[in-house]
Amino acid sequence: MCGIIGYIGPRDATSIIFEGLRRLEYRGYDSAGIAILNGDRIYAERAVGKLSNLAARLPALREAVAADPQLLQTGIGHTRWATHGGVTEYNTHPHFSANHCLAVVHNGIVENYAELKQELQSEGVSFVSETDTEVIVHLVDSYVRAGMSFEEAARQALRSLKGSNAVVIMSVRDPGTLITARLGNAGGIVIGLGDGEMFVASDATGIVEHTRRVLFLDDGEMALVRLNDLRIMRLDGRPVAKTTHLIPWDPVSAEKGEFRHFMQKEIAEQARAVVDTLRGRVNFDTGEVVLESLTLDANVPHHIHTVACGTSFYAGLIGKFLLEQIARVRTEVDYGSEFRYRDPLLSPDDVVLGITQSGETADTLAAMSEGRRKGARVWAVVNAVGSQAERLADGFISMRAGPEIGVASTKAFTTSVVDQYLLACAVAQQQARSGLLPDDAPDPFALARELVHAPSLVSHVLEPTPVFEELANRFHDREHFLYLGRGLNYPVALEGALKLKEISYIHAEGYPAGEMKHGPIALIDEQMPVVCIAVRDAVHDKMLSQVQQVKARGGTVIAVATEGDDQIAAAADYVIWVPPAPPLLTPLVTVIPLQRLAYHLALRRGCDVDQPRNLAKSVTVE
Ligand code: G6P
């Protein structure tokens, strides 16, 4: 959603905050702003649009700050994904008190803002923006004016907010101090412990270049951040002891390096990411799977309820096949936003499994909490280290994909599929040990050993080929695409269509191939490219006949097919070749070509691949 950065230290805060915003820009890019507290004044610049617009205004900010040199600078920055109020400069964060002595940046939604605003207005406060954020700063200010210290005023204000909110506030009364808080699941707050400097950010990506020693705030916690004095407490003032985490990411992994786009880099990183997610988890001699942060006891889940959003939801649909086929555990997959409101039937023998790259998606977290409230165990497959999903779960499997910056998710999809495969094998192996694995289940040790092929299969479909550029040149001007797949490749068709929609703005639908004749077939004409995932698997013949049905109606078929498949080659107009793969690992080789196809089509259409319009990387509001 929005990205937040805070800094206290001797260096040029403007540059540090701007660089942090650059790394967090994937969270929102409607507008951005920076405020620096220097001496007894707050200097600020804000600009609508991409960060480059703000960059143009930074020399003025630096100059103003440099005119009054201080030993210490304190600053905050924000990159916005608009929720309350349009994309305008006056709605851009930071927001200020009327006397400009307080500044605030915020991520989330203040649900009772209308009520608070009315109260403040009746006391004579005037508002300059349409945001809910502005009530926070005026509220703190009203308490300060009533005689409270900055800390006490911030605490009182934070206690009056309803909803999920992450906030950072600074005051000219307390230079060298940032007050930050996390209320609910509106995105995280990470505090970075530097060498003679302190950082605050919405996620570690924003500060990992400066420090890898971090603390994460939990729901209902507030922190008073000073150079040599970090105090973390509940909102009633009770101190909280926190553990320091060491972030394993190296700063370079959050850079584009030789690549033109983060998405391109992240697609290319998938072989490495799959190796990392397997590392130390499978004994390839015995096939035994060990998941370091998820303890499986004899109490195998009766029923798994997967909850996720977006790409993670589609990865969950693949996981359903894996968990049911390998572990024989009945699995349902829900959108987080649906599960939490449909009064799901859960028992203590059930597991609610959240899948989330960011570990911050509000709907997924709420669905996981709903699972907990109803007595189920809660597990997670999650990428962001130390995220809320990780901490909310009883056990988790880390995707180990490294930072994913491109808004369209790629490597988190493949790693979460591998992690669910590992989970299915681990659950089945646990059942096998207790003699509970049904006789008709496949050998989970042999299946785990097959994972040894996963990295090379992924590398194979990442090899350079001109096919994607050719297809992009041929089809970039189309308005609609249809994606068809069956079985495990039906969710892959959904994900392929989602990738195309997200970054190229071409309307695309994913459909189970067998359902085509019940509706979508009416759409097919020579203007409609149909991507058919038709690899050599148990439903190959059916897919071949689907390809022929599309051709019979004048459609153009782009097939994803297994190398050497002459039948498909003869029937389709274009073929993207993939290597033969073990049946349950097929999605790894079929999804990557669809990511690459979407990337090239979007590029050819001149779209902003990493920051598509209206989207945000982590959606921390409902
Ligand atoms: C947003 C992103 C998607 C992502 C979804 C779920 O919509 O744009 O790329 O798949 O959120 O995110 P999560 O972090 O929970 O996997």
Image (spheres, grey):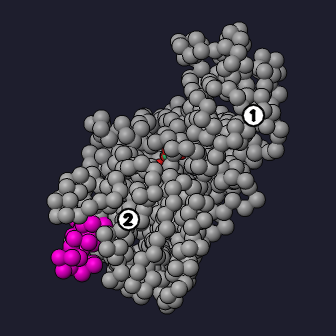
Assess whether residue 147 is covered by the magenta stretch: yes
Mark 2 sits near ligand 1, with its Cβ under 8 Å away: no
Q: Cβ–Cβ below 8 Å for labels 1 and 2?
A: no
Residue 471 shows in the view: yes
Residue at the spot of label 2: 95
Say whether mark 1 is within 8 Å of ligand 1: no
Which residue is found at the position 56% from the left and 77% from the top? 62
The span picked out in magenta is 137-159
Query: Which residue is under mark 1?
Result: 472
Q: Main secondary structure of the magenta part?
A: helix
Q: Residues within 10 Å of mark 2 (few under 14, many from 20)?
A: many
C-alpha separation, residue under disc 1 versus residue under disc 2: 44 Å
* Viewer-nearest residue: 272 or 211: 211
User: Looking at the image, is 11 positioned above or below residue 76?
Assistant: below
For residue 272, what is the image quadrant?
bottom right
Q: Earlier in the sequence, mark 1 or mark 2?
A: 2
In front: 376, or 593? Answer: 593
Residue at coordinates 18% horizontally, 80% vertically from top-left?
Answer: 147
Helix, strand or loop at label 2? It is strand
Query: x%, y% of residue 519?
Result: 53, 13
Q: Is residue 172 above or below residue 311?
A: below
* 264 sits to left or right of 123: right
State the mark number for residue 622. none
Horizontal and vertical percent for residue 68? Answer: 50, 87
Q: Quadrant of the C terminus?
A: top left
- Select label 1 or label 2 by which is in front: 2
Residue 203 is covered by the magenta coloring: no
Label 1 sits on a secondary structure element that is: helix
Residue 314, position in %: x, y? 52, 37
Q: Which amino acid does the dot numbered 1 rest on? A: Ala
Q: Position of residue 118 (x, y in %)?
A: 19, 55
Name the residue type under label 2.
His
